[in-house]
Amino acid sequence: MIKVAVLGYGTVGSGVVEVIEGNNAQVSRKAGDELHVKYILDLRDFPGDPYEDRIIHDFTMILNDPEISVVCEVMGGVGPAYQFTRQCLEAGKSVCTSNKELVAKHGAELLETAAGNHCNYMFEASVGGGIPLIRPINSALTAEKILEVKGIVNGTTNYILTKMEKEGADYGDVLKKAQELGYAERNPEADVEGHDACRKIAILASLVTGKNVDSEKIFTEGITKLDIADFKFADAAGMKIKLLAICRSMEDGGVLAMVAPFMIPKDSPLAMVNDVFNGVLVTGNMLGDALFYGRGAGKLPTASAVVADVIDCARHPGKTVVCIWDKEEARLTDAAEMQRRFFVRAKAETAADVEAAFPGGECFAVPEYPGESGYFTPVMKEKEFLMRYQGLGDKVLGRIRLV
Amino acid sequence: MIKVAVLGYGTVGSGVVEVIEGNNAQVSRKAGDELHVKYILDLRDFPGDPYEDRIIHDFTMILNDPEISVVCEVMGGVGPAYQFTRQCLEAGKSVCTSNKELVAKHGAELLETAAGNHCNYMFEASVGGGIPLIRPINSALTAEKILEVKGIVNGTTNYILTKMEKEGADYGDVLKKAQELGYAERNPEADVEGHDACRKIAILASLVTGKNVDSEKIFTEGITKLDIADFKFADAAGMKIKLLAICRSMEDGGVLAMVAPFMIPKDSPLAMVNDVFNGVLVTGNMLGDALFYGRGAGKLPTASAVVADVIDCARHPGKTVVCIWDKEEARLTDAAEMQRRFFVRAKAETAADVEAAFPGGECFAVPEYPGESGYFTPVMKEKEFLMRYQGLGDKVLGRIRLV
């Protein structure tokens, strides 16, 4: 029997217990041995809970119990979660987590600690919830040189953008509704400013490059400046607006990592990723594009990914599964040096100024906004674009990158 | 150094060599050791080929060489391929293959032989080409009870259906074009009659149930009876027509497996899978739906999946990776017992007869075909539907299942 401890009995923690107990026959068969939750660590008591008898408050009981070989860290945060993870790994206990903040910050170090102690640090649930994504990159697309990973990895903002597009609703109103439905936090900053997506792409970029990509150095722009008019112009041009997290291997050995709203063609596979769903397009040099799509969050999908990691640990006792993410810092390419087209929305009467600033692009209008004009610039360096865009002052109303 | 032999130097075989050599740094790093192609077995000689010196004609050189630990069987067919695979596995050499015919027919037995000899039989490339699909089901979605696998797994027929839909071209004309482009074989029967998709769903169904699903017992219907008018009616109803391979776990422990053209809603994730692309939707009881999408065929994508298997073998020397597919026969549910809606296309003047045969459905017309009418039946058992449909004789022009 494989005995497991769960750190944190919140949403994901209770999901992990539910998956292990609810799918026990399935899970145990795949693990090759019966899986059992022995301890649930939480500060609180849970009187009346069906697993009340397994709740403990003292972490050292887990650390000192030789029967525990796998620990699920689903507390979140980087304080105690970091300490507990380190101590478990040092004691040779594998740790499986959904904690993207901790993985993005200390992934390289914790993987090294795991390898040094013949156990595993696994984090499938940290990106894309229940969608297999880390494991395909680590264990399936292994024959590929991965050229690019590009995806929608934050369900909250994708829900907001989908509603703005489909219902023509205002950003503020949709955010409020998302908060009422529990899709957005009371303090939505981590989602709407792109920080959550940034941590996730930092993790993916680290796995793609094999080097450490510091999330704090990743160019990140959120969705708060998007206007409902932008969606009308996008639609007229056969495009959609999505918050994309991108990581691209550059020819000079550097890596571009960024998070920003992009206009993408309606026939892109990512264009059909709507509502709270996530979708990630991985481009390999042999395979071409592969898309991974599903529920990127939620109690049970996320818990399912944590338990899949537990099963992987159970299948590899005393062995560290290959995961290449060194401490060496990856060389990040400056997003401002990238070349692309841009969409500019301007007051209709200043269309000539916009055209003069970005000669050679194309201007268009939509009937719903007669006082505004849309403009696609030619391909240009982002740095150059921003300089000229800022020079236009209040003649321009908004801008969005084209993918 | 890990020395590999390739059986068959055709399209996939030359792709395997190209991936191992072309991505050698990447591949060797992931494998944890350098990968090298030592032999290429083929009946032919390849004068001037860059790997000419590795071509051999005698299989026993591979079998008797203790340096060879992994063999790629990319010959196809079930004759010599079966014998060679068995002999390699019995000698403790892992075999990685793209040969869906052999996997569908002897998968359970060859997996057992591999397990008995502490090596592996791997077949990621047999379904979905380069899209990771077998490995996600075996190694990632392990915490799930998989309820359904439903997908587009044949690129040739998907190309034909996409062209019929988008260009309004006739089946025969599109098939001819597909043959010219090399997307369809000279003898297209295996694709257009659904046999290829049938073998693939037999493999997936075997992995989902853990028991053997005999491809010859799977209900299979191809695309040859579809008419261009069907696409117009589908479009008017907000639907698309796709050849789906389906495997569903039934509540009574049985499994439904079938291949047939279906009408699916345009907003289904499978509806955006066009041209030669494949897409497979996996539904788990915790995760909900996850979609895997990409190039389901082609030299390099397929070869990439074979080499990913080689890397997995290299990472697990002397160890059999868990893959549950027993020899015990799965209990197949009779497709004729399933309940669903159906689309019926009829001569306009017989619409009343159709309505009388399937009361409670809905009738509709499209401007392009004034002499015909479309009809959606209510939900009914397939057996019942077919009996009544056949009773209508030449009053009806075609029928398609609704998903």
Image (cartoon, coloured by chain):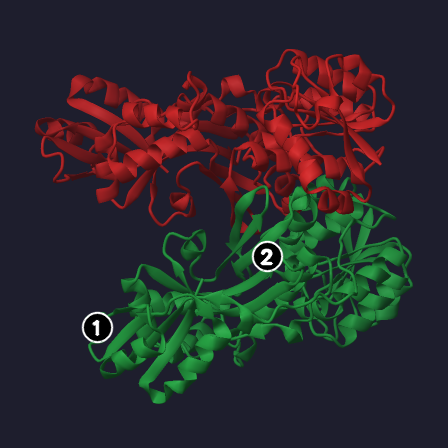
Chain colours: A red, B green
Residue with the mark numbered 2 = B300
- CB atoms of marks 2 and 1 within 8 Å: no
Depicted B79 relative to depicted A287: above or below: below
The count of marks equals: 2
Depicted B368 relative to depicted A98: above or below: below
Between residues A274 and A229, which one lies in front from this camera angle?
A: A274
Rendered residue at 72%/25% (across/down) = A111
Residue B163 at what x, y percent from top left? 37, 67
**Counting other residues with Cα less than 10 Å from the Cα at mark 2, is it few (<14), some (14-19), or many (20 or more)?**
many
Q: Nearer the viewer, mark 2 or mark 1?
A: 1
Residue with the mark numbered 1 = B368
**Disc 2 versus disc 1: distance between alpha carbons?**
42 Å
What residue type is disc 2 on?
Answer: Leu
What residue type is disc 1 on?
Answer: Glu
Residue A71 at what x, y percent from top left? 74, 26
Q: Is residue A115 left or right of residue A335?
A: right
Residue A47 at what x, y percent from top left? 66, 19
Between residues B308 and A266, which one lies in front from this camera angle?
A: A266
User: What SS does tag 2 mark?
Assistant: helix
Q: Is residue B219 left or right of residue B168?
A: right
Residue A58 at what x, y percent from top left? 76, 12
The answer, for residue B120, to whether it is visible in the render is yes
Labelled disc at residue B136: none
Quarter of the image containing the N terminus of chain A?
A: top right
Looking at the rendering, which quadrant does residue B306 occupy? Answer: bottom right
Marks 2 and 1, the one that precedes in the sequence:
2
Between residues B103 and B49, which one lies in front from this camera angle?
A: B103
Q: Is residue A6 left or right of residue A11?
A: right
Which residue extends farthest front? A48
